[in-house]
């Protein structure tokens, strides 16, 4: 395969978990995956706690904004990841069969920054490994 795999991370609001997953996957699997995120009911903005948690890890948050599923439906998606039960149930029907994994994470909305940091670390630990395994990617040297 000459191009990176395209991974779509779906959540309900696309304002927290899926945004953190997008940034983490793009960073940790750089060159191997291109990650997009979207929500079944996108919120007006990315949660301040999610931005703070990503910045705390030294990650770039420029340009992050919630998107609806329609914004990504024309992409050549290789893997769909749902990170909340609502998104799993509302996952759209794509024009072709696409492999999917469901890996729910705690929603830290309305909680202190520590909850966002814990969600970020959980996503980094479990989701990066799951995507790597599902796509048969090699670990970094």
Image (cartoon, helix red, strand yellow):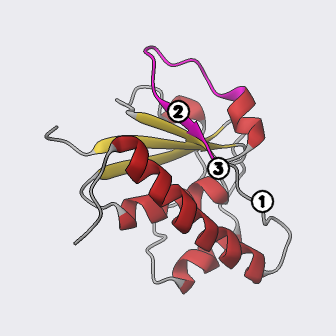
Residue 107 badge = 1
In magenta stretch: residue 101 = yes
The residue labelled by disc 2 is 100
Please, is residue 126 above or below residue 66 in the view?
below
**Left of 77 or right of it: where is 112?**
right
Decide which of tag 1 and tag 2 comes sooner along the chain: 2
Q: Secondary structure at mark 2?
A: strand
Distance from disc 1 to disc 2, alpha carbons, whole Å, reads: 20 Å
State which region is magenta. 90-103
N-terminal label among 3 and 2: 3
Q: Nearer the viewer, mark 1 or mark 2?
A: 2
Farthest-out residue, top: 95
Residue 130: image tag: none
| Label 3 element class | loop
Residue at image mark 3:
14
| CB within 8 Å, label 1 to label 2 | no
Above or below: residue 132 compared with residue 100: below
Residue beneath the point at 47% across and 34% down:
72
Per the picture, the main secondary structure of the magenta-coloured stretch is loop
Image-based side of 112 in relation to 72, left or right: right
Tag count:
3
Q: Nearer the viewer, residue 68 or 3?
A: 3
Q: Nearer the viewer, mark 3 or mark 2?
A: 2
Label 3 vs label 2: CA separation?
18 Å
* Quarter holding residue 28: bottom left
Q: Quadrant of the N terminus?
A: top left
Residue 46 visible in image: yes
Using a 10 Å C-alpha cutoff, classify the residue at mark 3 as few (fewer than 14 neighbours), some (14 to 19) or many (20 or more).
many
């Amino acid at each position: 395969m000459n191009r990176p795999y395209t991974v779509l991370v779906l959540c309900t609001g696309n304002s927290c978990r899926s945004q953190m997953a997008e940034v983490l996957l793009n960073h940790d699997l750089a060159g191997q995956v291109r990650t997009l995120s979207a929500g079944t009911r996108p919120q007006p903005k990315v949660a301040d706690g999610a931005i703070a948690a990503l910045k705390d890890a030294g990650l770039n948050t420029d340009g992050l904004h919630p998107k609806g599923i329609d914004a990504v439906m024309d992409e050549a998606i290789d893997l769909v990841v749902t990170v909340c039960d609502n998104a799993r149930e509302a996952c759209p029907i794509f024009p072709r069969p696409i492999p999917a994994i469901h890996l729910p994470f705690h929603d830290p909305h309305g909680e202190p920054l520590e909850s966002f940091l814990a969600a970020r670390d959980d996503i980094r630990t479990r989701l990066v490994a799951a995507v790597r395994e599902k796509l048969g990617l090699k670990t970094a040297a």
